[in-house]
Amino acid sequence: MKFVSENIILSDKYRSIWNILYWILAALLLLLIFSNSSYDFRIRITVTIILTVMSFGVSYFINYFLIPRYLFNGEIFKFLYLLLFSVIFSVWINIMAIIFIIWYTAYHYPLSSLPNKTDLILLVSGSFLIILFAAIVHFIKETYTKLIERNKAEQQKMETELKLKEAKLKLLQGQLHPHFLFNMLNNLYGLWMENSQTTPEIILKLSTLLDYMLYECDKEKVPLANEIQFIQNYIDLEKLRHDNRLSVKFDYPKITDNYNIAPLILFTFVENAFKHGANKSSGKSNIAITIIVKNEQLNFEIVNNFDSEKSTATNGLGLKNVEERLNLLYGKKYMLKVENDNNEFRVLLHLDLT
C-alpha cells in the first residue's frame, strides 16, 4: 500500500512538472507569434500573460471537468454544449481584456505603437490551438489510462473467478474423499463383524484406491487410462465383498492416446451404482458399464438394477457433486442424462476430451 501511494505521489509530481513546462512553452510560443518589435513591449507581455492564463483556465476546465464528467460518460451533447460555451466565454474575456489593455496603453502612453487587428486575431487563434492540443493530449492519455485500468480490472476479475473456481473444485473433490471413505469403512466394519476372510485383501486394495485419490486426484485432469484402472480396481474390491449374486460387466477400450479427464468423474457414477444397487439388494444385482472413446469423444454408460423397497436411487451427494464439477470443468462440452425406470437406473454421459 505504501509502494502504491509513493507511485501516485511521483506520478502527480511528474504530471505537475510537465504541465508547468507545457504552459511556459505555450507562453513563449504566443510571445513569438506576437513578435513584432515595433509594438510596445508592455502590451506584448501583458496580452501574452492574459492569453496564457485564460488558455490554462479553459484547458483545465475541459480536461478535468468536461472530459471526465461528460465525454467519458457518453453525454456527448452536454459536452459539446459546454465546450462551445467555454470557448465563446473565453473569446469574449480575451477580447475585453485586449481592448482594455490597448485603451489603457493608448490613454497613458499615447506615443506607443499599438498592434493591428490581424496580429491580435492570429494571437487569439494561437491560444486556442494550444488549448486544443492540450485537450487532445489529455484525452489520449486518459483514454489509454482507462483502457489499461479496464484491462487490469478484467484480468483481476478473471483471476478471481479462476481462483474461486479452483477453490470450489477443491471443495467438491474434498467432499468425495470422505464420502468414499465413509462408505468403505462401513463395508469393512460389516465384513469384520462377519469374520470374513477377505478383509485383509480388501484393506490392501482399499489402500491402493486411497493412494490414487490422495496423490493423483488433486489435479484438474488425470490420464483417462489411470481413471479407468482406478474404476477396475474398485470393481475388483467390490467383487470381493459380494457373492455370486453380483454380476458386473465392464467394457472399455485400450487407451493408447494421451486423453485426460477430470478425476473421479466417472467413478462417482460407478460408486453410486454399487451403493444403491448391489449394496442394498438382497437378490440378483446387475451392473453394466461401457466406455467408448472415438474421435476425442467419450461415451460412458452405466446401468444397474435396484430394489425399489430398499433404495430410491435418487440423486444424492455424489451425483450432485459430479454435476457441479462437470459444469465447472467442461461447461457446454458435456451432456449428461440420468434415467430411473422400472427398478433400473441408467446414466449416459458424453464428454468432449479435447
Image (spheres, rainbow, N blue to C red):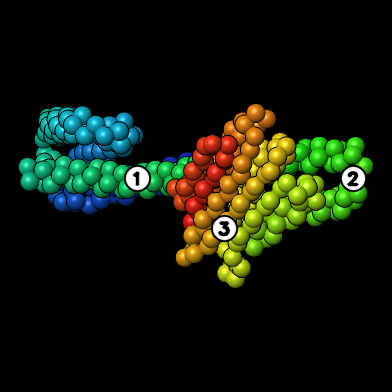
Q: Circle 1: is it few (<14), some (14-19), or many (20+) Cα within 10 Å?
A: some
Instruction: Give the percent coordinates (x, y) of residue 188.
Output: 84, 41
Answer with left or right where residue 307 lies relative to residue 111.
right
Q: In this view, does 280 lie above or below 35?
A: above
Secondary structure at badge 2 equals loop
Secondary structure at badge 1 equals helix
The answer to which quarter of the image holds residue 139 is top left
Instruction: Give the percent coordinates (x, y) of residue 232.
Output: 70, 57
Amino acid tagged 2: Ser
Q: Mark 2 points at which residue?
A: 196
Give the number of the mark in front: 2 or 3: 2
| Foreground pick, 291 / 297 | 291
Q: Which residue is drawn at 49% across and 43% down?
A: 337
Amino acid tagged 1: Thr
Regarding residue 36, the answer to whether it shows in the image is yes
Q: Name the residue under label 1.
A: 143
Q: Which residue is drawn at 19% across and 51% down?
A: 33
Q: Circle 2: is it few (<14), some (14-19), or many (20+) Cα within 10 Å?
A: few
Q: Nearer the N terminus, badge 1 or badge 3?
A: 1
